[in-house]
Image: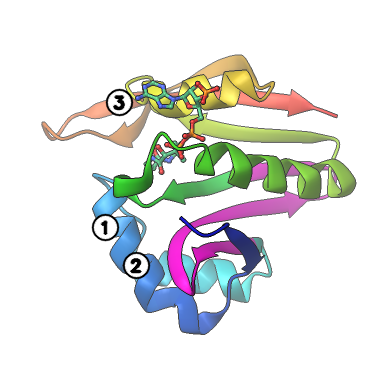
């Protein structure tokens, strides 16, 4: 695979981002969620190889706190180090713009949790019934954070 490039995400990326989001998440963000994030000026990047969108990441900054709102890699490319590469890029941004970066993750998302722990995030709390679940119920969120 040609080397991955990380660049600013722009409005023209949204159709491809939405397709990828629906493939990668059981409860995907809507077009409105992505549009709002763009309008709000969040830090949004696309990852691509050979002009093909393979991932994206979004960080919201409020004063000295950052929030990793979304990190997604195309499902057929999981486990090849791309998520780590994208997360390290987002961490570089967060380090220069925030004091602490927070994120929520489903306890069932063991791949994502392993990645976050490997990159230095610590578990700092639990948000009860934070996410919708497949059975119509709710799933807690682990709150993780990294201080810089
Ligand atoms: C989470 C996600 C971004 C990780 O991206 P990825 O490209 O698959 O991850 P990487 O290949 O960079 O792997 C990074 C680490 O994840 C862990 N990991 C990778 N594959 C794994 C697997 N099959 N099972 C458990 N952990 C795994 C390992 O700790 C790995 O580190 P290592 O390579 O040193 O062993 C990606 O799986 C994804 O897009 N998932 C769907 C969307 C999602 O859940 N986003 C996060 C929401 S909070």
Residue 66 rendering spot, x and y as whole percentages: 72, 43
Q: What is the distance, in whole Å, between disc 2 and disc 1 at their CAs? A: 6 Å
In the rendered structure, find residue 22 and report the number of the disc placed on it: 1
Q: Which residue is drawn at 50% across and 64% down?
A: 49
Of badges 2 and 3, the one in the foreground is 2
Which region of the structure is painted magenta?
44-67
The reply to whether residue 111 is in sight is yes
Whether 60 is among the magenta residues is yes
Q: What is the distance, in whole Å, between disc 2 and disc 3 at their CAs? A: 23 Å
Instruction: Please tell me how many numbered marks the rendered image carries.
Output: 3
In the rendered structure, find residue 18 and report the number of the disc placed on it: 2
Label 3 vs 1, first from the N-terminus: 1
Residue 51 rendering spot, x and y as whole percentages: 49, 75
- Asked whether 42 or 115 is in front, the reply is 115
Residue under pointer 3:
139
Q: What is the distance, in whole Å, between disc 3 and disc 1 at their CAs? A: 19 Å
Label 2 vs 3, first from the N-terminus: 2
Q: Which residue is drawn at 36% across and 77% down?
A: 15
Residue 134 rendering spot, x and y as whole percentages: 15, 35
Please give left or right for residue 33 compared with residue 108 in the image: right
Local SS, label 1: helix
Local SS, label 3: strand
Local SS, label 2: helix
The reply to whether residue 142 is in sight is no
Whether 30 is among the magenta residues is no
The answer to whether the residue labelled 2 contacts the one labelled 1, judged by CB atoms less than 8 Å apart, is: yes
Callout 1: 10 Å neighbours few (<14), some, many (20+)? few
Magenta stretch mostly in which secondary structure? strand
């Amino acid at each position: 695979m040609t080397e991955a490039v990380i660049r600013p995400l722009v409005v023209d990326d949204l159709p491809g981002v939405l397709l990828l989001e629906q493939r990668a998440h059981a409860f995907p963000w809507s077009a409105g969620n992505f549009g709002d994030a763009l309008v709000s000026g969040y830090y949004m990047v696309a990852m691509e190889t050979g002009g093909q969108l393979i991932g994206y990441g979004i960080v919201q900054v409020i004063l000295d706190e950052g929030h990793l709102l979304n990190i997604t890699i195309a499902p057929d490319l999981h486990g090849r180090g791309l998520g780590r590469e994208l997360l390290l890029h987002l961490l570089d941004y967060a380090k220069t713009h925030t004091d602490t970066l927070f994120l929520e993750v489903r306890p069932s998302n063991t791949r994502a949790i392993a990645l976050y722990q490997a990159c230095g995030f610590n578990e700092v709390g639990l948000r009860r019934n934070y996410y919708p679940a497949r059975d119509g119920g709710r799933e807690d969120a682990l709150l993780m954070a990294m201080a810089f």
